[in-house]
Image (cartoon, rainbow, N blue to C red):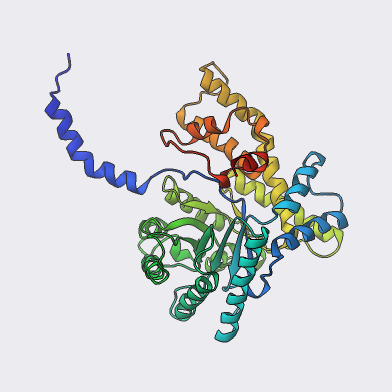
Amino acid sequence: MARLAPADYTAIDDRLAAVDAALAARYPGEPAGRQPVHTVYVPADRITVDLVPAWGAAALTALDEHPPAPFPAELDHRVRAKLASGPIEDLRIDVEDGYGVRDDATEDADLRAAAHALTAARAAGTASPWVGVRIKSLEAATRRRALRSLDLFLDACGGPPDGFVITLPKVSHPAQVVAMVDICVRLEQAYGLADRALTFEIQIETPAAVLAADGTATVARLIGESAGRCTGLHFGTYDYGTGCGVAADYLSMDHPSSDHAKAIMQVAAAGTGVRLSDGSTNILPVGDTAAVQAAWHRHTHLVRRSLERGFYQGWDLHPGHLPTRFAATYAFYRDGRAATTARLGTYLARRAGGILDEPATARALARFLLRGLDCGALDPAEAGFARRELVALAHPASGLGADPRTVSGEERADVR
């Protein structure tokens, strides 16, 4: 016979109500919708109307000029089709390190020209689904230039384009994130935008952004101070490694110092709805065939390594990186498809199997298949389950519906 009275249950509910609310606000869970597999950084003065198809064409040319293709023959059609139809998923117009230091008039003109090129590409149907601007940092020396660049770009675009995000680099203190929130609010008011129309991603590229002087995890505070506007944490391989004192020849996404930082990022972002992106490699697939093949081999290894560690997005800096970005991504999901569908089927049927799965594992299995569908690695018939069934498993009790940007291939056409 139970001994607790109704008042006892109510007392505990009341005691934990504030905690329940705080946890729900801080940890809303993984966001629904497609995450781009990469972000391509291009200096503002190199943005053209035909940038996206031109990168795809350059990637295809590289495959033809430097055989053999750096992926299994079974992926050839899938990779080539992607390079022809949508080679850049997330474009970042760069006025920071990749752009360099220019006089104010030049940066003003380049940003306006980039905005006009983007608008024309959207009208022509050749733009990337996601786009943004990497402004300069909010450190004292570049703060005003950063704000002016963002303002001018929004003005030239007539407001934020669809899928727009701001990239805030070289963050080293939570106060800079608080200031970024204030900037977003002021710009929304100035342009007559809806509340929270502007969001940003934070680049983790200084040691101080990972660990504070008192040993606490700064990155967790950065998320907390973003007022829900931070959508992603992007790792900056070279700035971070240099800040940690790593020699130039050893700066890499797979250096132990990089892995340490990304592990802290991963834990800090878990459950918050903030997505993660790994960094880039500066080893470009250029030169003779031997050099291109070596760069492709290295990039394939790094992309696969990131995926295996739960980083489903990364940076690409050159058209030659696109074949291996998509090939490595497709191979990751195709390699795991059969085992994943079998495990999920066993879980749903409650049959005994060699692995004891539980609801959390089922969510991971469903999310794996959804990511494979979303990026084009898997066709709908290969997933083994209907999309809505996978969504229900991946995001239980969410009531989520279809979003055109979460669908790829034939399914996307149906949604549109």
Seen at 61% across and 45% down, the residue is 307
Q: Quadrant of the N terminus?
A: top left
Seen at 71% across and 63% down, the residue is 318
Q: Which residue occupies the foreground of this view, 104 or 114?
A: 114
Asked if residue 324 is positioned above or below residue 41 in the image, the reply reads: above
Give the image location of residue 24, x and y in percent. 33, 44
Give the image location of residue 75, x and y in percent. 77, 42
Residue 98 in view of the camera: no
Asked if residue 103 is positioned above or below residue 61 in the image, the reply reads: below
Q: Quadrant of the C terminus?
A: top right
Asked if residue 34 is positioned above or below residue 195 in the image, the reply reads: above
Q: Which residue occupies the foreground of this view, 362 or 157?
A: 157
Seen at 57% across and 44% down, the residue is 406
Give the image location of residue 261, x and y in percent. 50, 56
Seen at 86% across and 49% down, the residue is 68
Relative side of 261 to 127, left or right = left
Quarter-wise, where is residue 235 in the image?
bottom right
Relative side of 121 to 215, left or right = right
Relative side of 293 to 366, left or right = right
Q: Which residue occupies the foreground of this view, 150 or 154?
A: 154
